[in-house]
Image: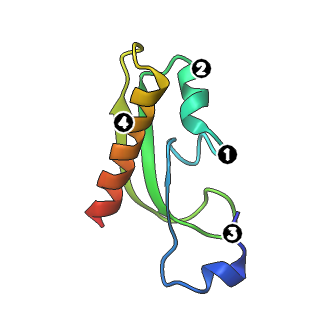
C-alpha cells in the first residue's frame, strides 16, 4: 500500500496486477490462480490509489499456461507481459 504523500509525488503511479480486478485482490495472485487450476492469468495495468487494487484500469491482457511450466517459465511469461503492458503506455 502506498501512502497519499508518496502518491502525490508523481502525476501517475502505475501498477501491473495479475488478476481480473476487482477479483483476485491481494498478494501473489499468479500463485493463487495456478493453485486453483487456472490456465489463463489475467493482467491489469492500473493507477495506484490509497486503497489497494482500486485505481482506474488502463489496460487488460492475459497470459496462457498449459500446466507444464516450471516456476522460471511462469515468471518469464509474467515479466514479459508486464514489460509489454508498461511499454504500451
The residue lying at 70 percent from left, 79 percent from top is 4
* Label whose residue precedes the other's in the sequence (4 or 3): 3
* Label whose residue precedes the other's in the sequence (2 or 3): 3
Q: Quadrant of the N terminus?
A: bottom right
Query: What residue would you read off at disc 3?
Result: 2
Q: How many marks?
A: 4
Query: What residue would you read off at disc 1?
Result: 26
Colour basis = rainbow
What is the C-alpha distance between the residues marked 2 and 4? 17 Å
Residue 77, labelled with which disc? 4
What is the C-alpha distance between the residues marked 1 and 3? 14 Å
Query: What residue would you read off at disc 2?
Result: 35
Q: Hey, which quadrant is residue 52 in on the image?
A: bottom right
* Label whose residue precedes the other's in the sequence (4 or 1): 1
Between marks 4 and 1 in the image, the one whose residue lies nearer the viewer: 4
* Label whose residue precedes the other's in the sequence (2 or 4): 2
Q: SS at mark 2? A: helix
* Label whose residue precedes the other's in the sequence (1 or 2): 1
Residue 7 falls left or right of residue 3: left
The residue lying at 27 percent from left, 61 percent from top is 88
The residue lying at 59 percent from left, 20 percent from top is 35
What is the C-alpha distance between the residues marked 1 and 2? 15 Å
Rendered position, 65 above or below 2: above
Amino acid at each position: 500500500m502506498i501512502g497519499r504523500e508518496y502518491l502525490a509525488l508523481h502525476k501517475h503511479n502505475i501498477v501491473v496486477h495479475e488478476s481480473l480486478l476487482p477479483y483476485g485482490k491481494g498478494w501473489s495472485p499468479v500463485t493463487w490462480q495456478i493453485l486453483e487450476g487456472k490456465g489463463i492469468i489475467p493482467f491489469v495495468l492500473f493507477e495506484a490509489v490509497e486503497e489497494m487494487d482500486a485505481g482506474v484500469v488502463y489496460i487488460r491482457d492475459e497470459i496462457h499456461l498449459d500446466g507444464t511450466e516450471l516456476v522460471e517459465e511462469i515468471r518469464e511469461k509474467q515479466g514479459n507481459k508486464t514489460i509489454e503492458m508498461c511499454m504500451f503506455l
